[in-house]
Image (cartoon, coloured by chain):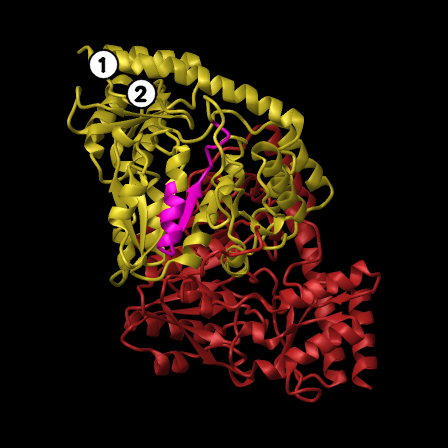
Chain colours: A red, B yellow
Amino acid sequence: MSAVNSYPLHIARRMADIAPFHVMDLLARARAFETQGRSMIHMEIGEPDFVSPAPLIEAAQQALREGHTHYTPAVGLAPLREAISAFYAEQYKVDVAPERIVITPGASGALQLVLGVLVNPGEQVLMADPGYPCNRHFVRMVEGEPVGIPVGAETEYQLTAEQCAEHWQSNTVAVMLASPANPTGTLVPEASMRDIITLAKKRRGRVIVDEIYHGLIYEGHAQTALAYSDDVFVINSFSKYFGMTGWRVGWLVAPTGYVAEVDKLAQNIFLAASTPAQYAALAAFDSDTVEILEQRRQEFKRRRDYLLPALRELGFTIPVVPQGAFYLYAGCERFSDDSYTLAHRLLNEAGVVITPGVDFGHHAPEKHVRFAYTTSMANLREGVTRLKNFLAL
Amino acid sequence: MSAVNSYPLHIARRMADIAPFHVMDLLARARAFETQGRSMIHMEIGEPDFVSPAPLIEAAQQALREGHTHYTPAVGLAPLREAISAFYAEQYKVDVAPERIVITPGASGALQLVLGVLVNPGEQVLMADPGYPCNRHFVRMVEGEPVGIPVGAETEYQLTAEQCAEHWQSNTVAVMLASPANPTGTLVPEASMRDIITLAKKRRGRVIVDEIYHGLIYEGHAQTALAYSDDVFVINSFSKYFGMTGWRVGWLVAPTGYVAEVDKLAQNIFLAASTPAQYAALAAFDSDTVEILEQRRQEFKRRRDYLLPALRELGFTIPVVPQGAFYLYAGCERFSDDSYTLAHRLLNEAGVVITPGVDFGHHAPEKHVRFAYTTSMANLREGVTRLKNFLAL
């Protein structure tokens, strides 16, 4: 009985614009192969392969022993907001009042809050294409209009102020940036960040900066957008650098005047972020945690430094060295003009799982794939060997 | 610097229709009094006073020891979906395939998924007024139009099929029910549930049933709406009966044809529910957990059976005995024609915190307050004494 729908489905129009992650099909297929005993090298997964650092796990266990299982305030635990404020002071020498910091169910929750508060139906939000696919879906969810602007190697896959100015319309209310970006791993240059913030201010719009990969930068030190302006929204997360993907806890820094609206929306749509996750995150800035995280960052750097030249050698095009995150966005035009089919063939014939470009937007996705170095050096080496054998055919 | 907004705020129009929980102001004031050493009796809080049952906490701790800190699939852990399916079979003798069950970040997450998938801008969703205030806000979030239908004691504060038919327009796509309801604690009678489902089917709309208080019923046994139809959406949660409020984990049962759309939206807006919370929930149906939960249910019944006549005796109007949840929705017209001011006076002058009617809708909120019996018998007795002294003035 449950397989039958007894009358026609009514599905909101927005759902036609909200795409699934195509890589999920590849992942499901890979898991099925693995069940049959076939070995798969996973270079598609957008989360660190490491378990959350032990001090975080211990902090959660301690909180559970103490019975912290009730709701927190919608904006999150006060000590966690204070710890994040102290983190900005220490890490970036930037003063961010705890009152401007809202704890969210992952960066996803933060994106939803910002766009829910900012975007009316039909209003436009600018963003780079390729980019994190959910960004345009969050905009659609509230009936806004995402405007993907094609970006390439010539701007290190980031929007410039000139591009933003060119695409800015009377109904544009915000521009979304990510630094480092997914899938390209590149940073927004400091000058560009300042120029875009200046432009947005002039046009009475807002800049939303995703800094969830900010801890994972392998050359130099990047500054937070909060150093340049109190008018920006900054989104961050305990998922990637801090290794807490599954817990679902992140944060949002909002301009002061928006905090009450963000709080109101958070109360209504989430109630609060997960309490054990928030208690775990309280240990995220402890020195023993940071030591583990810095070792992991070095390990990611080693992986990048191995995989990048190895893929170039195989014939993939990676024109820009990504400074951060754990992705390589690679042109595959030498092997195929259809990256989706290539990804499926690599899965089926070579036992290597990667993400096809289609998951990151509409700008030349068929010519690109994303490699994630979220697996061990041994696996990366085996993956490269398999790729080499497959591509030599 | 961070206190200044350097240019005007652009705030989406929907935010004017999304109200904060007014009780939060009362709660903040009460906490401030407590800091000063004043005693407060909390009868406003919509979550059980009990810590999560020990077996759930142990299950989470075990999962953390085993390193389960990564993302789960967007629809949740397969064994948890299977456990919920088994729960429906055992508890309700209803066959619900695990494939129709989606694990969500609390019932809040489930509501967002359903309304995101169902409601186009301008489309209407019917709901009872008074009711859970977030329901109308979830509809507004996706630019739909919530239609609150006044309900009173004559229909046990629930919508009837006649009322739904009367308010059903060509652009109505769904009706939301809650059984037991917040703030009234009443059930949708079985015949009424069947009639509303039949009506919705005839009108090609959907029934969304909130069953988050379903485990907390004090007389007889209520049947899930899933027993009457596979076309309904049912929302449930581990928060209330299972005592897991802070963890943020609930579930949605969707008609088969909607599952792929729900999955797609969940991937994009949540990624997944919190992993430690899902592992904890795996122990929710174990016999040692159930034993604890049933003791707690009996305790809630004792509290209701004490508080209901006590409030009536004081002069509050409670025309219908609520069969479930942990709320008493009481007319306060004998004491005030302004329940908001009354709630503030009770806080300030009597040290009793309750929720004013304004938090539950637009239908006579000034004549009603909500008492939550989420505190001990001793506290309830003290609260009643304080109320008595205050009201005798």
Q: 10 Å neighbourhood of mark 1: few (<14), some, or many (≥20)?
A: some
**Residue type highlighted by circle 2:** Val
- Alpha-carbon distance for marks 2 and 1? 10 Å
The subunit carrying tag 1 is: B
* Residue closest to the eye, B312 or B349: B312
- Going by the picture, which residue comes out furthest to the bottom? A334
Please name the residue shown 78% across and 69% down the image. A380
* Above or below, comparing residue B35 to residue A360 in the picture: above
The subunit carrying tag 2 is: B
**Magenta span contains residue B121:** no
Point out the tag, 2 or 1, that comes first from the N-terminus: 2
Q: How many marks?
A: 2
For mark 2, give the secondary structure.
strand
Task: Identify the residue position indicated by label 1 in the image.
Answer: B390
* Residue B170: % across, % down: 28, 59
* Above or below, comparing residue B160 to residue B326 in the picture: below
* Residue A25: % across, % down: 65, 66
Whether tag 2 and tag 1 are in contact, CB under 8 A, the answer is yes
User: Is B366 on the left or on the right of A6, as rendered?
Assistant: left
Task: Identify the residue position indicated by label 2 in the image.
Answer: B352
Q: Which residues are magenta?
A: B195-216
In terms of image quadrants, where is residue B153?
Answer: top left
Q: 10 Å neighbourhood of mark 2: few (<14), some, or many (≥20)?
A: many
In terms of image quadrants, where is residue B380?
Answer: top left
In terms of image quadrants, where is residue B179?
Answer: top left
User: Is A39 on the left or on the right of B275, as rendered?
Assistant: right
Q: Quadrant of the C terminus of chain A?
A: bottom right
